[in-house]
Image (tube, helix red, strand yellow):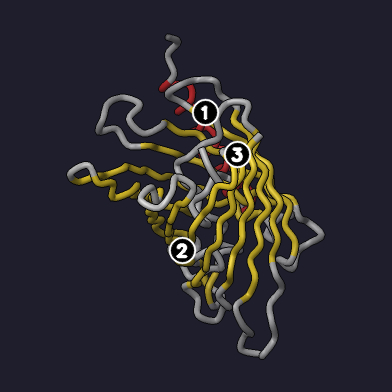
Amino acid sequence: MENSNRVGKLGAMLLGVFLIVGGVYAPSAHATASTIIWGPSTDIQPFKTWHLTSDFYVPSGRDATDARPSTITNLGLTTGVLPFKNLNAEVGFDVKSGTGVDNSPVYFNTKAGIPENAYGPFFPALAVGIFDVGTSNNKTNFDVVYARAAKTFSVGGFSLGRFSVGGFTGNKNLLTYNGKASNDGIRLGWERPLTEISDKWWVGADYQGSKSSYGSSNFGVSYNFTPTTSVIFGYDIYNNKDLVDTYTVQLDINF
């Protein structure tokens, strides 16, 4: 019964994505699923653009047993699949290691959304999606479903950056804290190009609720080596203080 309920929820979410696609369209982005530092952003890869990412999460210290947790690596590929101006979608997958379930390393993701200002100057960016859809039942099928809205603000011509808010829910059997479900919560984000220094620099922060291994505050800066290649240097502080914080380095290439 539990598995059938989960399949139903996943099917309903995917149906919702396709209803957005079908309902909004009438004939007439950046870091897999595209992220801020860790949590998915409202950015979506343009049509036929392929996005390759290689992410590393390195523990900053030792855990309560004086052991150093494994470094987690993530190699991901995402591509844009819709040719429309005011509606975008992407699909992708990640291959992870160091998670403790390396015999099932493949995870899938998809996202659909509407870009900022698509229907007027006050219209926010909107996105709905799912990520970390693993292939091993109740081991890697985290199935994190989320929705997010984002808007850029400025005062007197000075950009305050883009702010975002949303929420998520995932597999209650895997997203836990002290043996109890901790599988949903709020998502917050802020990001801004540092044009006062250079068009190549960017700074951002995001937050995801819950005390599961997904719950964290994340901070980072990015540098664009070329228009299609960038690297993020960041730090992750986990809501569950039993988890060791991590440094993250993320290389992103569009082609």
Residue 249 image-quadrant placement: bottom right
Query: Which disc is residue 18 wearing?
Result: 1
Please tell me whether mark 2 sits on a helix, a strand or a loop.
Answer: strand
Where is mark 2, residue-wise?
Answer: 219
Q: Name which residue type carries label 3.
A: Thr
Callout 1 amino acid? Phe
> What is the number of the mark on residue 122?
none
The answer to whether mark 3 and mark 1 are in CB contact below 8 A is no
Q: At 69% across and 56% down in the image, what residue appears? A: 74
Q: CA distance from mark 2 to mark 3?
A: 22 Å
User: Closer to the N terminus: mark 2 or mark 3?
Assistant: 2
Nearest to N terminus: mark 3 or mark 1:
1
Q: Are marks 2 and 3 in contact (CB under 8 Å)?
A: no
In space, the residues marked 2 and 1 are separated at their CA atoms by: 33 Å
75 in relation to 42, above or below: below
In the picture provided, is 26 more to the left or to the right than 61?
Answer: left
Image mark count = 3
Q: Which mark is residue 228?
A: 3
Dot in front, 2 or 3: 3
Q: Is residue 71 left or right of residue 245?
A: right
Name the residue at the right extreme: 103
